[in-house]
Image: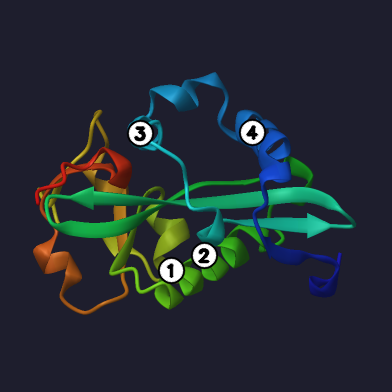
């Protein structure tokens, strides 16, 4: 496989079934019990900021991003990120994250938050989220809460329960 054989494209509605299959393969049925999935149940992900890796018309990986809020702070929640087993360790996941973060930056997202392994995500620009900044809807190892700050100072304003943006209380 050469880098040229993989295309990184915006997600389209027709990709849904294969993305669901890739996520099931990667995370199993236990994925629905995780905190990040609980947040995602609150509404749709942003397809304009979600991407697939395609080789010869086959989707081999995907990453999604969902708008979330914590009190007055808005962010993107990155994930799930999944790559088919036969395509792992080829840089596809890292490239999907890079493409997603650049799209988030272009969309003026203040930050991108995720739940994941620091050794994987830190080289991609993510740092541990300071303890106590957000409250997740289910238990999460605080060391797995990571953030890429895209607008300086946005982490300082982050505080409160993290929910899907569609579930946020709107005060007029």
Considering the numbered disc 2 on the image, is that residue within a helix, a strand or a loop?
A: helix
Mark carried by residue 100:
2
| Distance (Cα) linking label 4 and label 1 | 22 Å
**At x 40% / y 31%, what residue is drawn?**
41
Q: Where is residue 91 drawn, in percent x and y?
A: 66, 63
Q: Whole-Å distance between the Cαs marked 3 and 2?
A: 21 Å
Please determine whether, in this image, residue 77 is positioned above or below residue 153.
Answer: above
Q: Nearer the viewer, residue 63 or 15?
A: 15
Looking at the image, is 29 positioned above or below residue 116?
A: above
| Marks 3 and 2, the one that precedes in the sequence | 3
Q: Position of residue 96 (x, y in %)?
A: 60, 62
The residue sitting at 57% across, 24% down in the picture is 28
The crowd level at tag 2 (other Cα within 10 Å; few <14, some 14-19, many 20+) is many
Q: Which residue is mark 4?
A: 20
Q: What residue appears at the point 68 percent right and 50 percent down from the top-left corner?
A: 61
- Residue 129 visible here: no
Circle 1 residues within 10 Å: few <14, some 14–19, many ≥20: many
Q: Which mark is nearer the camera, 3 or 2?
A: 3
Q: Which element carries disc 1, helix, strand or loop?
A: helix
Give the mark nearer the N terminus: 2 vs 4. Answer: 4
The residue tagged 3 is: 42
Residue placed most toward the observer, 120 or 80: 80
The residue beneath circle 1 is 104
Cβ atoms under marks 2 and 1 closer than 8 Å:
yes
């Amino acid at each position: 496989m050469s880098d040229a054989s993989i295309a990184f494209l915006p997600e389209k509605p027709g990709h849904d079934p294969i993305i669901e299959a890739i996520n099931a393969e990667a995370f199993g049925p236990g994925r629905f019990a995780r905190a990040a999935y609980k947040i995602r149940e609150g509404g749709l992900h942003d397809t304009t900021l979600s991407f697939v890796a395609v080789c010869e018309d086959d989707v081999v990986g995907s990453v999604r991003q969902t708008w979330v809020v914590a009190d007055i702070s808005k962010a993107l929640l990155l994930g799930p990120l999944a790559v088919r087993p036969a395509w792992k360790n080829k840089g596809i996941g890292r490239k999907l994250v890079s493409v997603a973060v650049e799209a988030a930056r272009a969309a003026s997202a203040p930050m991108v938050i995720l739940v994941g392994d620091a050794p994987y995500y830190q080289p991609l620009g993510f740092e541990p989220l300071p303890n106590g900044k957000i409250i997740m809807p289910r238990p999460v190892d605080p060391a797995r809460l990571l953030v890429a700050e895209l607008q300086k100072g946005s982490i300082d304003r982050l505080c409160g329960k993290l929910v899907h943006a569609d579930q946020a209380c709107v005060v007029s």
